[in-house]
Amino acid sequence: MKKNLFFILISLALFIACNEEPVGQTPLDNIAPGKVSDINVTNIPGGAYLTYKLPDDEDLLYVKAIYQLKEGGEWLNTRASLYTDTLKIEGFGTTEERTVKLIAVDRSNNESEPVNITITPLTPPVYTIFETLEMSEDFGGIRYTWTNETAANICMHVLRRNKAGDYEPLDELYTKRKNGEAQFLGLPALTKDFAIYITDRWNNSSDTLTATLTPIFEMQIPYTDIKPYNMTGDTPSEHGWLVDYLWDDRLFDGANSGYHTEVFSGPWPHRITFRVMTGKVKTSRIKIWHRDGYFYRHGNVKKFELLGSNAPNEDGSDDGWTSLGIFESYKPSGLPGTSTTNEDIEYVEQGESFRVSPDFDAYQYYRIKFLESWSGSHFVHLMEVQLFGCPDGYVPDYSDEE
């Protein structure tokens, strides 16, 4: 009986083994796969999308495209797996017709006969982006803007002409931003020749944009030059935290050294008004410090508007005022609620700077309209406010740097 059972089990095992699917590598052969067919070309900036029908070979592995970016250049290849019917090729620096060979490859590395197709790339991104590139003066440097509709990976090269008359590199910015804006700062207010050109990872290069620019001088307006200018509609202070203390050069000393609105200040916005006693200032930025111990919570300012005027209306209204921007406090971690990280604390302890466009005029009177606190409560508090810019008519002495 035991012998019969043993033979039955052996027979069953052999039967199951014979009916299992093969496991492991597909057997190698020397048979080339069929060609791709029904190819469709969609030209794109600097390249093309190729869609096709795959051959029916069971051991098909991938499809590759072989091409040259320029006549006589290196042969490149791009692959697409058997799980897709689309292949993207890019990197062409012109809109000239190019021939691309499409080849099917199987698991034995056998290659099909190539299928030659013609593509006509659209204008490469480096050239279309260059057409939108603009360069202008900024506080302490230069500013440049561009439009990159395809979000192409590019590098912006910034140069400046030196005393010998040669352009030397200042900066390289790698970006794929669609609506880009960048600055190169830390420059003296001296008239110089600047240049910018664009490259991509295939070494395609745009023309060069040149401009003669004078960076706008920037300095911190001394605390002693700034005084409150109380007007009808300004928000009263409370707890002995006066508006004047915003310019007392005291931070985190545990005393009443900041400004606190009345706790029941009514609906938003709340506001303060101040003036620069020495005259107009072309403002570059404003810097604000949170109240310590309550970073990113309580009444610390989350959102505000800065306005400037040279003829404020005596009734305290916004007539005669120009909005210089609406700004929002930033938390690097992005954590919700009152949660913070060490990076958040280190960032906010240095004070938050908010940039003002150099396109605005110089103003003597300024107004801050508080629009939101971090807790949502209807009061705000802050420790210090610094104003940066160039006093109207001020000419710095750079005789040693000429």
Image (cartoon, rainbow, N blue to C red):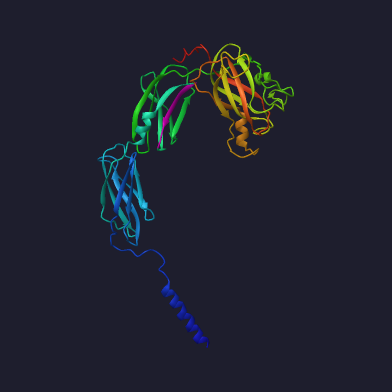
x and y percentages locating residue 93 in the rendered image:
31, 37
Residue 248, picture quadrant? top right
Among the 4 quarters of the image, the one containing residue 162:
top left
Expressed as whole percent of the image width and height from the top left, the position of residue 241 reads: 71, 22
- Identity of the residue furthest to the bottom in this view: 1
- Apparent side of residue 183 relative to residue 111 in the rendered image (left or right): right
Q: Residue at x 57, y 18 (%)?
A: 319
Q: Is residue 304 magenta?
A: no
Q: Residue furthest right?
A: 239
- Coordinates of residue 108 in the picture (x, y in percent): 32, 60
- Is residue 141 one of those drawn in magenta? yes
Residue 332 locus on image (x, y percent):
58, 35
Q: Residue at x 46, y 79 (%)?
A: 12
| Residue stretch rendered in magenta on the structure | 139-149
- Compared to residue 74, the image places residue 369 above or below, namely above
Front residue of 22 and 308: 308
Choose top left, top right, bottom left or bottom right for residue 205.
top left
Quarter in which the C terminus is drawn = top left
Q: Main secondary structure of the magenta part?
A: strand
